[in-house]
Image: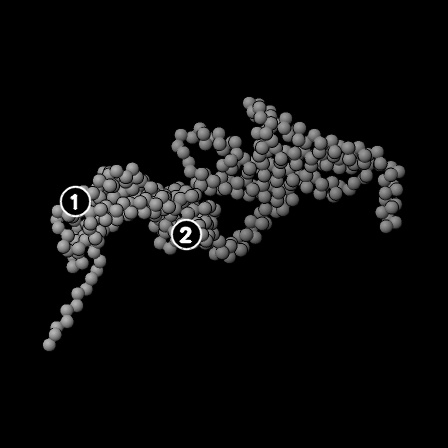
Amino acid sequence: MEQIVDFINSVKALQIVDIVVAICLIILFKVLSPSISYVIIKLFKFNTKSKKAIKESAFYIPLKVFITILGVYLAVLFLKKPLNLPDNVMNIVTKAFQIISVLAFAKALASSFTTKSTLIKKIRKNWKNDVEDSMLEFALKVVRAIIYIVALFIVLAILQINLSGLVAGLGIGGIIVTLAAQDTAKNIFGGVVLFIDKPFNVGDWIQTPNYEGTVEDMTFRTTRIRNFENSVVNIPNSTIADSAIINWSKMEKRRYKFSLSFPLETTAEQMEIISNKLREMLMNEPQVIDDDIIISFENITDNGLSLLVYMFVVPTGYNDYIMLKDKINKNIINILHNLGVDLSYPTTSVYIERK
């Protein structure tokens, strides 16, 4: 405690003015950091008049952090002689300033590569071919990962860590790392394959041999699917890339097929009337595609006469499809009721011989 008091007394006696100047310098840079950041971004976005748009720039907050840290760094440099700071302390402060600057710039640059950033929106607007958000987001994740990896190597260089020794060390454990990372590498490669082939997008309803649901997200390693039980399944990209994928969301139209069975006593004239009535009802339904309607006397079985009804409908979404089926089925029941025709059902006749 006495040592601290002695230090404070010596500071008060010798360097109080310098410390006050240094503190004022830090406060000045902190207060001016928003304005300076705004002016710097404005120089690069001179056509942008909206203050909100400038402040929402990916570089705005990192610039404020950099300018504030710059003020602290300059204050320490100013106090180097008055406080007689040793070189090793100044070396640590300089490295800290450099590392924070690199990380701030990497953060700003990485934030520029998102689907919501102004830069990507402008680039995408100039592209002739539309790119799905899911595929673009996956590519941007790769770009952001590269930016952070480069920033990491720069930080290691600032810390004067021997990269050649690090690489050599990795070489010694290369076999272990390779074996451990096999599945990860396969999944990343599978993600690249999915990005190139584009079999589905986020929001699509897909089905694989083992999974079915709506795609929620794609990462380097996995694809997240929410199934119809409302639970989430994370599937390795390599598994999906090697599987047959049915993308139900890509349907331009949806098939609806069923058979109606009538008693054997039904006459050919009645079957013709039923077919005509059903066709007329389906032709008048806006969500049924007229050119694809097939109504045919399909088969004669022990249980009755089978009438095939085959069509394609406009709704491809499951809920809309179910609602249309409900409407069509009710109309069919009403038609058969008005014609006085009943549907047959499987029956078995048992004859008992009397002796």
Image position of 106 with respect to 166: above or below: above
Quarter location, residue 88: top right
Residue 70 location (% of width, % of height): 69, 34
Instruction: Give whichever of 258, 222 is nearer the camera.
Output: 258
Q: Nearer the viewer, mark 1 or mark 2?
A: 1
Mark earlier in primary sequence (1, 2): 2
Q: Which mark is residue 260?
A: none
Which residue position holds label 2? 228
Q: Report crowding for label 1: few under 14, some 14 to 19, many 20 or more residues within 10 A (C-alpha).
A: few
Which amino acid type is marked by label 2?
Answer: Phe
Circle count: 2
Q: Is residue 330 left or right of residue 34?
A: left
Indicate which disc residue 273 carries.
1
**Secondary structure category for the residue under label 2:** loop
User: Does residue 85 lie above or below 174 as drawn?
Assistant: above
| Identity of the residue drawn at 87% across and 46% down | 5
Q: Residue at x 74, y 31 (%)?
A: 28
Residue at 45%, 29% in the rendered image: 125
Q: Are marks 1 and 2 in contact (CB under 8 Å)?
A: no
Give the structural element (helix, strand or loop) at label 1.
helix
Q: Residue furthest bottom?
A: 355
